[in-house]
Amino acid sequence: MRQQGTLTDWNDDRGFGFITPVAGGPRVFVHVSAFPRGQRPATNDLVTYGVGRDQRNRLSASDVLYVVPTRSVRTATRRLRVALATATLFFALLVGLVALDQAPVLLLAPYCLFSVVGFGMYRADKIAAERGAWRTPEANLHAIALLGGWPGALVAQRVFRHKTTKQPFRTIFWGTVIANCVALAWLLFNMPARLG
């Protein structure tokens, strides 16, 4: 028999949380794998679910379904589009500078490489968080963003719903983005002869 409840506690980094039944009673543990694919859960989502016991003999939810399309899904989709647009615009700007002979072609390679590496690091860290395995140090995630991988990292944050709300991580991340862009601008405007 299915029950209805509200996701009152959710740890997106680790991929689990608790549902409070609408009818009352103890909270029910729920893992991200119990939710439908393509829709990341968020606090206050109204859901229906089956109830069983997990390996620790805790009440555990299974086959979770959203009662109504959640606002969090629409918000997440919009934020992913913004992240993709930001990364695309940045690379379009770099390509434009290269086409106008204002930047060397070789400048594109590190940004592409570090963006791919950054995307992969976020994916690996998200998987590790869900499995309770060894995590990628946050300093490494910030370092790859500072080196030029921030476009890939920005998209990965939205694709995997990872590190999107945690503070001070978010503040430091945007600091690395600004620092990288300032360094790039300084490089392009102050050393064009050497870059050519």
Image (cartoon, rainbow, N blue to C red):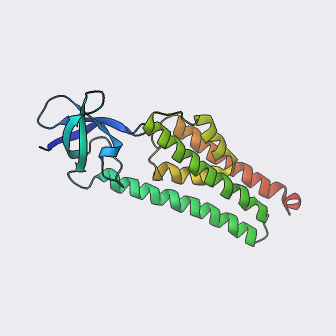
Q: Residue at x 64, y 63 (%)?
A: 91
Residue 120 spot, x, y in % from top left: 57, 49
Nearer to us in this view, 94 or 66: 66
Examine the image and state in which quarter residue 89 appears. Answer: bottom right
Residue 193 spot, x, y in % from top left: 88, 61
Residue 115 spot, x, y in % from top left: 63, 54
Q: Is residue 55 above or below residue 141?
A: above
Quadrant for the N terminus in the image: top left
Q: Residue at x 26, y 45 (%)?
A: 45
Hey, which residue is sitting farthest bottom in the picture?
A: 99
Q: Is residue 146 above or below residue 25?
A: below
Residue 72 lies left or right of residue 89; in this view the side is left
Examine the image and state in which quarter residue 23 appears. Answer: top left
Q: Residue at x 69, y 68 (%)?
A: 95
Nearer to us in this view, 142 or 93: 142
Q: Residue at x 39, y 53 (%)?
A: 76
Residue 154 lies left or right of residue 108; in this view the side is left
Hey, which residue is sitting farthest front in the picture?
A: 55
**Residue 49 shows in this picture:** yes
Nearer to us in this view, 77 or 5: 5
Quadrant for the C terminus in the image: bottom right
Q: How many marks?
A: 0
**Residue 163 shows in this picture:** no
Residue 171 spot, x, y in % from top left: 55, 39
